[in-house]
Amino acid sequence: MQVALKIWRFDAEKGERALREYEIDAPEEATLLDCLDIVKDRLDGTLAYRKSCRMMICGSCGMRMDGAAVLACQVRMHDVAQAGHVPVISAMGNLPIVKDLVVDMAPFWGKIRAVTPWLEPGFSDPGEQEHVVSQPQMNAIHKESLCIMCGCCVSECNSMEADPDFLGPAALAKGMRFVGDARDQATVERLQAYSEPHGIWDCTRCYFCNERCPKGVDPRDAIAKLGAEAMKEGIDSDMGAKHAKWFVTSAKTTGWLRETELVPKTQGIVKSLKEVKFAMGLLRHGKVPPPFPPHVAEHVGEARALYDLVQHEGEDGYDGIVQLEHALGRLEHEDGHGEAAERGPYGEGSFPKPYLPGEESSDGGGSE
Amino acid sequence: MRTVAYYKGCLASLSAKELDISTQALAPKVGLELIELEAVTCCGAGDIHEAEPDYYLHLNARILAYAEETGADTLMTVCNVCTLNLRQANHALQGDPALLERVNRNLTKVGVPAYSGGVEVMHFLWLVAAGEGYELLKGAAHRGLKGLKIAPFYGCQILRPSKLLGFEDPDRPSSLERIIEACGGEAIDYPAKIKCCGFPIIQAREETALAELIQPIEQAKEAGADAMVTPCPLCHLSLDAWQSKLKAQTGKDFQLPILHLSQLVGVAAGLADSELKFKRHVVSVAPVTDKLAV
Ligand code: SF4
Ligand code: SF4
Ligand code: FES
C-alpha cells in the first residue's frame, strides 16, 4: 500500500524545524514504526527516532501522530492509508527535542528517580520462611506494574505543560506501585514526599494520561489512590487535600457543596482575605451564594448515615479505588458490555482509532 | 417527549443558577421532560472520589437509586464532572454484582431504595447533539445566532477517559460544533478546545491553573471568537469568573463572553431574559446580545 507521512524534522544544533512529506510503499500490515523504518532505509537516512522491541514492550517509540501520543509500533497504518489521510508525525510533548522524533528523556527519568522507585523493605526479618505476598495484595498494584515508561502520558499532561516541575503521571503511578506494595515499609514517608508541591495535589484531572497510556496504567487513578491513602494516613495539610476534605464535610452536613466556605477552608483565612476584592467582584454577579441559611438537600440524614456506615466497611484509602477499578475491569473484559468486550486483544478496534478525515466521529446515539 | 431524571448538581443549584434556569426553560423545546431529583447530594466532584472513595461510591449510588425510582431510564446531567463521577460509579455497580449488593445493603439500611443498575447517565449535550433531540433543536433554534463566531470548549471530563464517556472521539469531538451550526452560528476551531480549564486546582495551585486557563481563552480570541460555549459549569466558572485574574496577571483584558450550552441554544431558541440570566455572568455577554438584539 502507498503510505504518505508528514514528519516534523528538528535540528537542535541549528534550531531549525521543518515539516517534510514522504511517500513510501509499505506492506498492508505495516505499523507507523515500520513506515518510519522504510523512510529511513530508502528515502532519508538522517531521520532520527527511537525503537527497540517493535512489540509495545520496551517503551522506546513514543511519539505523536496527529497531535496524540502513541507508540509507533502499535499503530497500524492500513486504514489511514486507505482513507488517503496524511498524518502528521512529531516528537512527544513536555520533553525537550534532541533531533526529529527523539526527545531528551532525562527530565522523565529524573522524576521517576525522585519517587524512590525501589522497594524499601525495612528490616523486618522473615525468619525461617520468605515473605509471602498474596495475589489480592499484588492485584492492588497490577495496573501500575504494567508501566513501560514510554512517556506517552507525560507528553500530554496539562499540569506539566503549565508547571514543568510537576512530578507527572508516570512518576506518580510508579510511586503508587510502591505505596501499594505489601512489602514496602516506607509508605508514610513516600506519601509525605509525594504530597509536597508539584506532587499529588498538582494534578488537574485532565485525564489525558489515562486516555493516552498504551498499557492501561491509568495514572490519574493511581494519583487518586495516593491522595486517598495520604488522607487516610492524616497527611492532609496541602491545600489540595483540604479542598478535597471540604467536599466530604459538605456532603455529610448539607448534602451540597458549601461553595462559599470552600475558599477559606482550602486556603486558610489569611490568604483568602487577600482574595476579598476578587470575591466582591463575584458577589455582584451572584457567584458567591450566601452560606446562611445553608442550602440543605432533602433527606440529608441519609447521606450522613451512609458516611458513618462506610467507615466500617474496610474499603478506605486506595482500596476504595482498587475495588472500583476491578469492577470496571470486569465490565470491560468479561461481561460483554462496553466496546472493549467486543475487541480481540489485537483485533480491530484494539488500537487507538486513527484520524480519518471526512468520517463523522460520532453521530451520537449510543454512549455504551 | 422523552422523560429523564434531572440531576443538576452543586453549581447549578448555587453559583451557576442560570444554568439550571435556562436548562429547565429549554428542555421542553428539545423534547425533554425533566423530573428533578430533590433528595440528592453532591456527586463529590472528584474530590470525594479521592478523599473517601467508598463514600463517593455510596453517594453516587444513592443518586442513581433515586433516579431509578422516578421510572426514567436516563439520568440527565448538566456538568462534565457530575457526568464522569456518576458514569464511573454506575459502570462499577453494573459490572460487579457483589459490589452492587454490598452498596445496596448500606443504602437500604439508611432508607434509600436499592439500585438495580437500570439507569444510564447522559449529559444534556449528548441528548441534544444526536437523534431526536438534535432534530427538535434544529427546529427550536429559529431565532438563530446570526453568524456569531462561537468557540466550542469541551473541557476534560466529558471526553476523557473515553472508555467511561465514549460519546464521541475524545481528540476530535464534534457535538458542540454541530449544535453551534444548527443554531446558526459559526464554530471556531482552536487547539485548546479539548484541554483543561484549570478548575480542579484553581484554589490550591492558582498559578498552574491560570497557565491552563489562558490557553483556550487566548486561542479563541485570536481565532476571532465572539463568545465561547461550554457544557460544564465548572469550566464556566473558571473561564468567566477567573478571566479578571488573567487580566491582573498578564495585562490582557480578553472580555470573552462565556455561555452555558443551555444559554447558547436558549438564546437561539428565543428564551426570555429572565430565563437566560446573562446578568449573572462576570464577563459581560453584551457582544452576543447586542448582535442578536435580544
Ligand atoms: S503510565 Fe503508561 S503512558 Fe505513562 S509511561 Fe507508563 S506505560 Fe507509558
Ligand atoms: S490527569 Fe493529572 S497527571 Fe494525568 S495528564 Fe492530567 S494533569 Fe497530568
Ligand atoms: S519499539 Fe518498543 S515499544 Fe515500540
Image (tube, coloured by chain):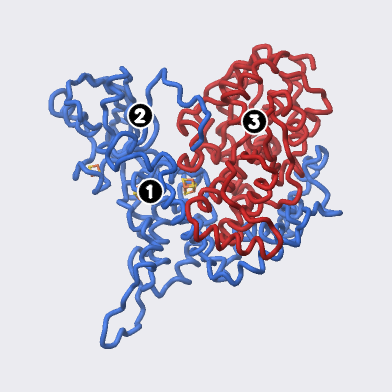
Chain colours: A blue, B red
Q: Residue at x 32, y 19 (%)?
A: A83
Q: Would residue A233 be found to the left or right of residue B30 on screen? A: left
Q: Chain of mark 1?
A: A
Provide the secondary structure element on which disc 1 rests: helix
Q: Which mark is residue B252?
A: 3
Q: Picture coordinates of residue B43 (x, y %)?
A: 64, 51
Q: Which mark is residue A354?
A: 2
Residue that numbered label 1 is attached to: A333
Q: Picture coordinates of residue A295 (x, y %)?
A: 80, 51
Q: Picture coordinates of residue B36 (x, y %)?
A: 74, 41
- Callout 3: few (<14), some (14-19), or many (20+) C-alpha neighbours within 10 Å? few
Which is closer to the viewer, label 1 or label 2?
Answer: 1
Provide the secondary structure element on which disc 2 rests: loop
Q: Disc 3 marks which amino acid?
A: Lys
Q: Quadrant of residue B214?
A: top right
Q: Is residue A14 above or below residue B226?
A: below
Residue A35 in view here: yes
Viewport quadrant of the N terminus of chain A: top left
Q: Picture coordinates of residue A144 (x, y %)?
A: 38, 57
Provide the secondary structure element on which disc 3 rests: loop
Residue B210 in view here: no
